[in-house]
Image (cartoon, rainbow, N blue to C red):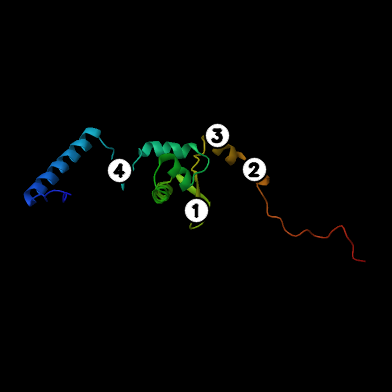
Amino acid sequence: MGGGGKKPTLSQLTKRMERERRQQQERREAAGYEKSVLGLSVPDMEEVVSYVKSLKYVTPYVLAEKFGFRLSLAKRLLSDFVSQGLLNVVAGDNRLRIYAPVVEPTPAAEAQEAAQPEATKRRKRGKRSKEGKSSS
């Protein structure tokens, strides 16, 4: 009924720890790891921007699911896009916001809008007068 063997000396423990540390570092270098933030891989920003511009609307959940990062990061990214002028906030509150890409007007659409006469634009409607009815 053995007692499990001798305990290693202090110098043996330090040598073993140093050897394990070197082996672990060599494995990391051999595997080649991607740049990450908080253990999450960061996608290419041009890819994210082109994806966002291709959609009709974007929510933080859609972005987080597509690229595989946290919702907090997706929310921060979308708010940065709004400040850069790539997105507009369409609807939302503190918990959820819905964004839409900024649509740049074409020169033809601008010319058509400018050519519309004032009469065809929307007028304010007031109360109708009772001209047809007589009060006698």
Q: Amino acid at mark 2?
A: Pro
Q: Residue at x 67, y 44 (%)?
A: 120
Q: Amino acid at mark 4?
A: Ser
**Mark 4 / mark 1, whichever is N-terminal:** 4
Q: Please report contact status of discs 4 and 1: CB closer than 8 Å, yes or no.
A: no
Residue that numbered label 2 is attached to? 117
Measuring from the top left, give residue 17's x and y in whole percent: 14, 46
| Residue 120 falls left or right of residue 44 | right
Dot in front, 2 or 3: 3
Q: Residue at x 36, y 39 (%)?
A: 45
**Mark 2 / mark 4, whichever is N-terminal:** 4
Q: Label 2 to label 3, Cα distance in Å? A: 16 Å
Q: Which residue is at the far bottom?
A: 136
Dot in front, 3 or 1: 1
Q: Secondary structure at mark 1?
A: loop
Measuring from the top left, give residue 51's x and y in whole percent: 44, 37
Dividing the picture into quarters, in which one does residue 65 lie?
top left
Dot in front, 3 or 4: 4
Q: Label 3 to label 4, Cα distance in Å? A: 45 Å
Residue that numbered label 1 is attached to? 96
The 10 Å Cα crowd at callout 3, few under 14, some 14 to 19, many 20 or more, is few
Q: Which mark is residue 36?
A: 4
| Residue 57 falls left or right of residue 13 | right
